Image: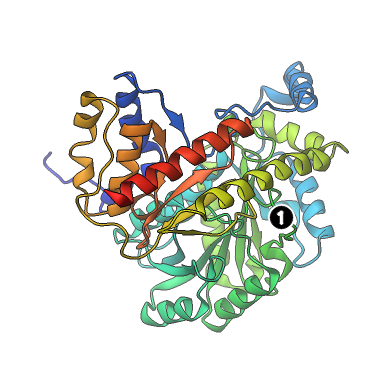
Amino acid sequence: MRNDILHHGAGELKYEIREIVEVGNKIEKTGVKITWENIGDPVAKGEMVAPWIKEIVSKMTADDNLSYGYSPTKGLLETREYIAYERNIEGGVQITADDILFFNGLGDAISTVYNYLNENARVIGPNPAYSTHSSAEAAHSGSPHLTYRLDPDNNWYPDLADLENQIIDHPEICGILLVNPDNPTGMVYSQDMIRQIVAIAKKYDLFIISDEIYSNLVYGGVEHKKLASVIGDVPGMAMRGISKEFPWPGSRCGWVEFYNRDKDKSFAGYSQSIIAAKMLEVCSTTLPQKVLPKVMGDPRYYPYLAQRTSFFWEKSQLAYKIFSAVDGLKLYKAYGAFYMTILFKEGVLHKGQSLKPANQAAGEIIRDVVDSPKLDKCFVYYLLASRGICVVPLSSGFNSDLYGFRITLLEPDIKKFEKTMIEIADAVKEYLAS
């Protein structure tokens, strides 16, 4: 081309959670049956949507005026009013419908939020990181994502000293990202921990982004508190959606709640640029917005979520029991979302370890990948080619300096889930002994 058309951050757009699927599909064609433990889609994994939710959706589709036309750019007023009301009765910062902006899923929201941030302004996020955030933030700036450490020896809570040191060392940082409950670790932030992060943001004049897509999926006796409960007068935003809760990932329905836009002129202008960008797209998908208050306001909704989360808790405990018995691994139970991270202890991985592929063709497919300097990635691809189980490496999949892998707690058949976890644990033992 006569001019360089490549965006300066294009090389930072990486998403191994789905990239590994391409390799898995090739291996499957060699005759190896694949068990997909890589992606957080409850429906694809076999979970059935509750019949009463389907009935509500079905009724909405029958009325042309309810679902087939455009919605207002910000989203349906009655839906935004419902969300604002529910948010406000929880306590903390108060919002109105005008503080809520709908997107076509949180992927759309995340892309827009970072795309309209000044390219010299950075948002620091957790390590391990959720790759949609880390890639989008890195791409907007054209530099590797800046991170603070989640401490695997302290239930994956943030290392606040590391966070503050990073903020001091990188004056370009203007915002702090939380993912609460966390993906990939399953950690749930305590209200006190959020309060301390808010204090750091206030001290250094930063804003906060809190990804709360899993906010109603907590279990094991922990209590989830949203950013709004303790944000005070610090500017920030929360990201929420229905893809994991209903679950309805195909709805592409998420929203951002803006907090304290009146407290900072720069943040107010930035927030308005995000709203203006959405106006160029006309609106977000109408049908799920119409459905949302009907489902969330139904008396069956929270009992339904309680039933779902009790099953995630059962599998969290089962996975912990299986993997904690394996020398060379360490982990903590998940208490939120539907993921768990399993770490390799320091020094147990080295070059030359392997698993025998299920067939020669599968071995050829992974031949180049298993030369990776990321030692957990080597294990993950050997696991895929030998056992047909697809998990995600922590280092390359979640922008981490730790070695491990993420599993999901989504398999609806508890016996099949147990069998898969045992197969992974046995593969780890064989790999570490090789």
Taking depth in this image into account, of 113 and 263 the one nearest to the observer is: 113
Q: At label 1, which amino acid type do we have?
A: Gly
| Residue occupied by mark 1 | 220
In this view, the residue farthest toward the left is: 2
- Quadrant of the frame with the N terminus: top left
Side (left or right) of 322 relative to 231: left
**In this orientation, does residue 283 appear?**
no
Q: Is 431 located above or below residue 26 in the figure?
A: below
In x, y percent, where is residue 150? 49, 67
Q: Is 421 located above or below residue 23 in the figure?
A: below
Q: Tally the numbered discs.
A: 1
Residue at left offset 68%, top offset 74%: 192
Question: Where is residue 264, by image quadrant?
Answer: bottom right
Residue at left offset 66%, top offset 64%: 227
Q: How is the image coloured?
A: rainbow
In x, y percent, where is residue 16? 36, 43
Taking depth in this image into account, of 123 and 419 the one nearest to the observer is: 419
Taking depth in this image into account, of 264 and 174 the one nearest to the observer is: 174
Residue at left offset 80%, top offset 46%: 82
**In this orientation, does residue 124 appear?**
yes
In x, y percent, where is residue 79? 75, 41
Q: How many neighbours does mark 1 have within 10 angstroms: few (below 14), some (14-19), or many (20 or more)?
A: some
Q: Is 358 located above or below residue 310 in the figure?
A: above
Residue at left offset 82%, top offset 52%: 85
Element type where label 1 sits in the image: loop
Side (left or right) of 333 relative to 358: right
Taking depth in this image into account, of 114 and 408 the one nearest to the observer is: 408
In x, y percent, where is residue 272? 56, 57
In this view, the residue farthest toward the right is: 299
